[in-house]
Image: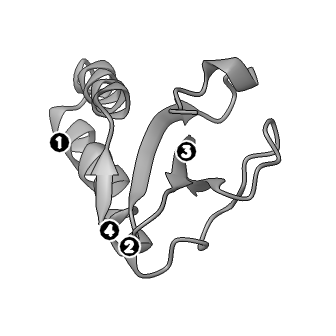
Amino acid sequence: MVKWTAHAKSQVRHIHDYIAQDSPLYAKRVSEELVKRTLDLDTLPRKGKKVPELNVDAVRELGLYSYRILYEIKVDDLVEILAVIHKRQHLEPEEIPRDL
């Protein structure tokens, strides 16, 4: 099962709203594609690469357009989407919202 955190959902809404200032159609398309990109993670959780800032096997990322979709593989076939950030954004490990 793939579960989106409130933080990740909020980031996708922010991305949508930012793009919608120029193109509502493209904003909708990008936000839908971000969600679609995660749909098969319940069957292929190791599809993404390890997040280099953490180097933890369970925390991985997928790329789409200029965004990084960060997720964590949990127990019982749960994949939790942690964040969606721009690839150029500097990321500190403590900024990744995780339950430890």
Which residue is tagged 2?
42
Find out whether the residues at labels 1 and 3 contact each other: C-beta distance under 8 Å: no
Q: Earlier in the sequence, mark 2 or mark 3?
A: 2
Q: Earlier in the sequence, mark 1 or mark 3?
A: 1
Q: What percent of the width, then of the height, locates residue 6?
A: 28, 29
For the residues labelled 2 and 1, the Cα–Cα distance comes to 29 Å
Q: Earlier in the sequence, mark 4 or mark 3?
A: 4
Which residue is tagged 4?
39
Q: What percent of the width, then of the height, locates residue 3?
A: 30, 51
For the residues labelled 1 and 3, the Cα–Cα distance comes to 25 Å
Q: Quadrant of residue 70?
A: top right
Find out whether the residues at labels 4 and 1 contact each other: C-beta distance under 8 Å: no
Which quadrant does the C terminus fall into? Answer: top right
Find out whether the residues at labels 4 and 2 contact each other: C-beta distance under 8 Å: yes
Which residue is tagged 1?
25
Q: Earlier in the sequence, mark 4 or mark 1?
A: 1
Marks 2, 1: nearer the viewer: 2
> What amino acid is found at the position of numbered circle 3 in the picture?
Leu
> What amino acid is found at the position of numbered circle 1 in the picture?
Leu
Which residue is tagged 3?
70
Marks 2, 3: nearer the viewer: 2
Find out whether the residues at labels 4 and 3 contact each other: C-beta distance under 8 Å: no
Point 68% across, 19% down: residue: 94
Tag 1 secondary structure:
helix
Tag 3 secondary structure:
strand
For the residues labelled 4 and 1, the Cα–Cα distance comes to 22 Å
